[in-house]
Image (spheres, rainbow, N blue to C red):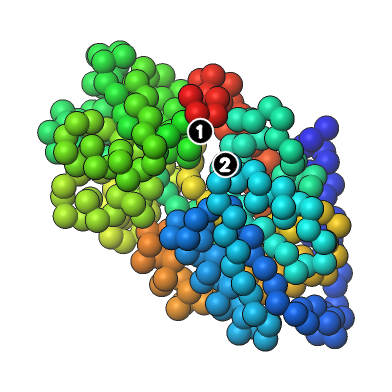
């Protein structure tokens, strides 16, 4: 049922985008006042950084101020509820992520929103690969060596993450499931403390974002074994193999995109999609994204809807298999 509903809604969006005539869009009054991007994270995180980049550029395109409003906390649930309840007029848009739209539907049984019912997907904006990193003293230097070592010593190795239910934690658990490994999870309260202990040698293995791990990898204070995306990251991390080169089909990453409250006019959804995708092909914008070890991810509303559905299915499998609960 959920898959059929998703497909019908996505097809409606795609059809609307196809039949909208350019003159009609040109005459549309939207936007004629400031637009808000609701960000469910504090300033400085990747989703916030790229939301501000899009807001700055769209302010020039739309000739109206685009304001980023941070509403952090509660695993993004309060911010998403707020956006869900906002007027469906295109003036409040939601920055959605792998956590709020991919993981939360399985992690929280009583989640007060349904990503593909209460919102209209507009477009993804970026992917941030995650990377398996290790202390220089760790015995394995490649992903193959890690798999071999873990199979020889089941339950003896451990890895650090930013905390239970985070993309770092669940991506490593997905890797363990696919490779059939027993590696113990050591959760931290954020990637910063976990990275500090990895650098100090107190833990030997960790999953983190490429953006956060870029500096220590570059100056060789830690070694990188593999990135989680289906293809390798760009320079300067292009020498790091993808997990998919060893485990075909593996693909996981942090991501962030745009969605609108349900019943937002489809012509507005189509316009936002068109304008954001144009920015994601602008060389100056691409440079800023790539400098943070991220990957631009333009696409259609139907592609984004199908991607979200796949994410919900993937992380639901991991949450069920590991018994992960919020804060555990």
Image coordinates of residue 296 in percent, x first then y, are 50, 62
Q: Helix, strand or loop at disc 1?
A: loop
Q: Residue at x 56, y 71 (%)?
A: 54
Q: Residues within 10 Å of mark 2 (few under 14, many from 20)?
A: some
262 lies left or right of 70: right
Say which residue label 2 marks. Answer: 75
What residue is shown at x 86% (from left), y 57% (from top)? Answer: 263
Which residue was labeled with disc 1? 165
Q: Nearer the viewer, residue 26 or 31?
A: 31
Instruction: Point out which mark residue 202 bears.
Output: none
Q: Is residue 200 above or below residue 35?
A: above
Discs 2, 1 touching: Cβ within 8 Å: yes
Q: Residue 75: image x %, image y %?
A: 57, 41
Answer yes or no: is residue 267 visible. yes
Element type where label 2 sits in the image: helix
Which of pointers 2 and 1 indicates the residue nearer the eye? 2
Classify residue 243 as left or right of residue 101.
left
Distance from label 2 to label 1 (Cα)? 9 Å
Image: 20 above or below 241: below
């Amino acid at each position: 049922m959920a898959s059929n509903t998703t497909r019908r809604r996505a097809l409606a969006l795609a059809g609307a985008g196809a039949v909208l005539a350019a003159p009609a869009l040109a005459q549309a009054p939207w936007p004629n006042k400031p637009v808000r991007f609701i960000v469910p994270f504090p300033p400085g995180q990747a989703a916030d950084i790229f939301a501000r980049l899009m807001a700055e550029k769209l302010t020039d395109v739309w000739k109206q101020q685009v304001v980023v409003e941070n509403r952090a906390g509660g695993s993004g649930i309060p911010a998403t509820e707020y956006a869900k309840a906002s007027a469906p007029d295109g003036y409040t848009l939601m920055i959605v992520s792998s956590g709020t739209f991919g993981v939360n539907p399985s992690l929280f049984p009583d989640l007060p929103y349904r990503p593909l019912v209460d919102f209209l997907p507009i477009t993804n904006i970026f992917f941030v690969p995650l990377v398996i990193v290790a202390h220089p003293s760790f015995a394995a230097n490649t992903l193959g060596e890690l798999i071999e070592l873990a199979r020889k010593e089941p339950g003896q190795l451990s890895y650090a993450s930013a905390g239970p239910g985070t993309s770092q934690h669940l991506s490593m658990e997905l890797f363990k499931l696919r490779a059939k490994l027993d590696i113990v999870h050591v959760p931290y309260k954020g990637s910063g403390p976990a990275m500090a202990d990895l650098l100090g040698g107190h833990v030997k293995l960790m999953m983190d974002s490429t953006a956060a791990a870029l500096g220590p990898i570059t100056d060789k204070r830690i070694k990188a074994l593999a990135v989680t995306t289906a293809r390798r990251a760009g320079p300067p991390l292009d020498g790091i193999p993808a997990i998919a080169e060893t485990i075909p089909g593996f693909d996981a990453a942090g991501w962030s995109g745009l969605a609108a409250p349900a019943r937002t006019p489809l012509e507005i959804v189509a316009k936002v999609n068109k304008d954001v995708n144009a920015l994601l092909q602008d060389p100056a914008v691409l440079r800023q994204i790539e400098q943070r070890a991220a990957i631009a991810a333009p696409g259609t509303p139907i592609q984004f809807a199908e991607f979200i559905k796949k994410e919900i299915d993937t992380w639901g499998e991991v949450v069920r298999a590991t018994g992960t609960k919020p804060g555990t």
